[in-house]
Amino acid sequence: MKRISLLAAALWLGGCTATLAPEPALQDTAVSDRLAGSRWRVETIAGKPLPASIESTVEFGPDGRLFGMAGCNRYRGRYRLDGDTLQVQQLVTTRKLCFPTIMIHEQSLLRVLQGARRIEREQGQLLLESRNEQGVSRMAAIDVPEQG
């Protein structure tokens, strides 16, 4: 009986340990302070103006996380910045049904982010080139930490 109690206790304690999944590869490299903690309002997607009635944002967290509003759905993922090369991975979104015009812009923004290639920051704006869409996407600063 004592053996069974010890075995049960060992199994119970073993079940209390956490198994952590390996962190994604993007976590391994330092995130540049140039984007960390900044928030941007999307003005154009692949060179096409975003209608004023559609709110799309991009936020870069200090921990390599990317999130925002795509139009009527929220999204999140991971990013890495190496010089002027931006890499975005693991984008996931909520799945609310929206008006078709909003959905078109939403899908374009997500394609641009997933195909992110080159990013340039100048005078309160962020310019993004993507492998997935022709034309430059432009974002205006909402809250941007001072560069120093």
Image (spheres, helix red, strand yellow):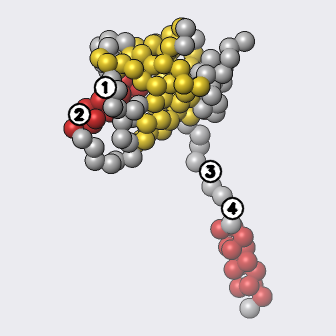
Q: Earlier in the sequence, mark 2 or mark 4?
A: 4
Name the residue type under label 1.
Answer: Pro
Amino acid identity at mark 3:
Leu
Quarter assignment of residue 91: top left
Q: Looking at the rendering, in which quadrant would you find the C terminus?
A: top right
| Residue topped by disc 4 | 17
Name the residue type under label 4. Thr
**Residue 20 circle label:** 3
Mark number for residue 101?
2
Cα–Cα gap, marks 3 and 4: 10 Å
Distance from disc 1 to disc 4, alpha carbons, whole Å, reads 50 Å
- Identify the image quadrant of residue 63: top right
Residue with the most extreme left position: 100
How far, Cα to Cα, is label 1 from label 3? 43 Å
The answer to which of marks 1 and 2 sits earlier in the sequence is 1
Using residue 101 as the reference point, say whether residue 60 is left or right of it: right
Earlier-in-chain disc, 3 versus 2: 3
Q: Mark 2 belongs to which amino acid? A: Thr
